[in-house]
Image: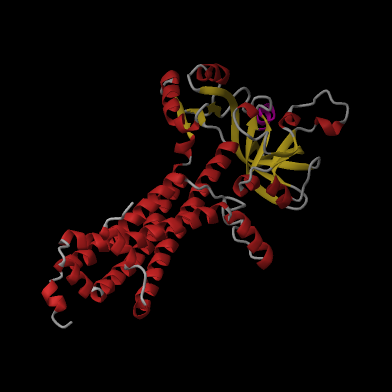
Amino acid sequence: MFLPYEVFIGLRYLKAKRKQTFISIITFISIAGVMVGVMALIVVLAVMTGFQEDLRDKILGTNSHIVVTQYGEGMHDFNDVAEKVEKVQGIVAATPFIYSQIMLTSENNVSGVVVRGIDPEREADVTKVGENMEEGSLTDLISKEDATDEKDKIPGIIIGKELSRILGVFLGEEINMVSPLGNMTPMGMVPRMKKYRIVGIFDSGMYEYDTSLAYISIESAQTFFNMKDTVTGIEVKVTDFFNAHHIAKEVRKVLGHRYLVRDWMQMNRNIFTALEMEKAVMFIILLLIILVASFNIVSTLIMVVMEKGKDIAILKSMGATSSSIMKIFLIEGMVIGVVGTLLGGAAGVILSLNLENLLIAFEKSTGIKILSPEVYYLDKIPVHVNYIDVFMIMASAIAITLFATIYPAWQASRLDPAEALRYE
């Protein structure tokens, strides 16, 4: 099978003769520039996609897909509301909860946290809190009023791993829960206080939750906050969390306007909007690296056109058309772009898939912590290679390099044979 002569000549021009070594070096630099740009773009977007998905999973592991609350002080008919909600298509389970801010005090420290009153037997149907337990279980929150040991009669509380370190307490130890909304006495407002025993410690993998979240039973929360038979709202789990927004609309229609129905995307809109914007901006910024590399392709082809002026003139004299000459240099530029893109794509995917192991090795050898959990939401660098993103990056790189070859190829096609051979 014979190649068209335009392809044959275009590939031949990539091979440098002894006096054209400089052009060959620039050609390799151009390929390397495209490769580095594509590789960097793939790695960065893989990290950002992984960060976004891991953050989403951590949020949905601790929070429900949909939250239903009632305008006013609380929800009294929560059992009826939960039954109505569970009948909506696409909903898996619903459970009541109580939400409030309190202080936890130990002998060593004090910390302000958010406490959630939950139904220990139903919470696992809605969130992944039960799966995140390092010590103890959700059922340990169930009251043991008939226990013979006085210590077992103390209501239980589950706290995060980092919070247990801050307070200096461990499983089985006692802490005090203090509410700033206390009881009114003749001496003024007195904070409400109650002793709790730590029956479980969870690790959500998200530093913010592990330091500022605690769980108690819903009965204990109603007693402590004087809520009687009232709850804050209903937590809801759906079959497809990407469809939570549409299911929330259906729930809103069923319950009416007295209830506020919010899905997880609404409640965390600022975080995910910022991540999407950052990902888009990073794509544009790193695409400039490929654009810079394309200028190397332009300069390489211009020098090749100047060097090959005599060859172009001879080809035109032999009957080659301007379009054929243009194809020769388009093919040469495309080879540089495609080879650089393919090498960069392969290197970017391989580096992304092994990035976590490389960073662990770097941290162990240098002692430098790349991702501090005290600063970021997560305790490790998540990476997820989205092959649609990889395809878009490689397609964009090839399009940019093709566009960069048009001008020098067009200039070569306009070369006058008589002018080129005048001084030969």
**Quadrant of the rendered structure where residue 181 is?**
top right
Q: Which residues are magenta?
A: 218-224
Q: How is the image coloured?
A: secondary structure
Residue drawn at x 15%, y 61% is: 321
Q: Is residue 405 above or below residue 111?
A: below
**Quadrant of the rendered structure where residue 372 is?**
bottom right
Which residue in the rendered view is the most extreme toward the front?
1
Q: Out of 282 and 37, give the one closest to the viewer.
A: 37
Majority SS type along the magenta span? helix
Residue drawn at x 67%, y 49% is: 111
Q: Out of 71 and 31, give the one closest to the viewer.
A: 31
| Residue 414 visible | no
| Residue 160 visible | yes
The spot of residue 41 in percent (x, y) is 44, 57
The spot of residue 283 in percent (x, y) is 39, 55
Q: Out of 337 and 256, give the one closest to the viewer.
A: 337
Q: How many marks?
A: 0
Q: Is residue 416 magenta?
A: no
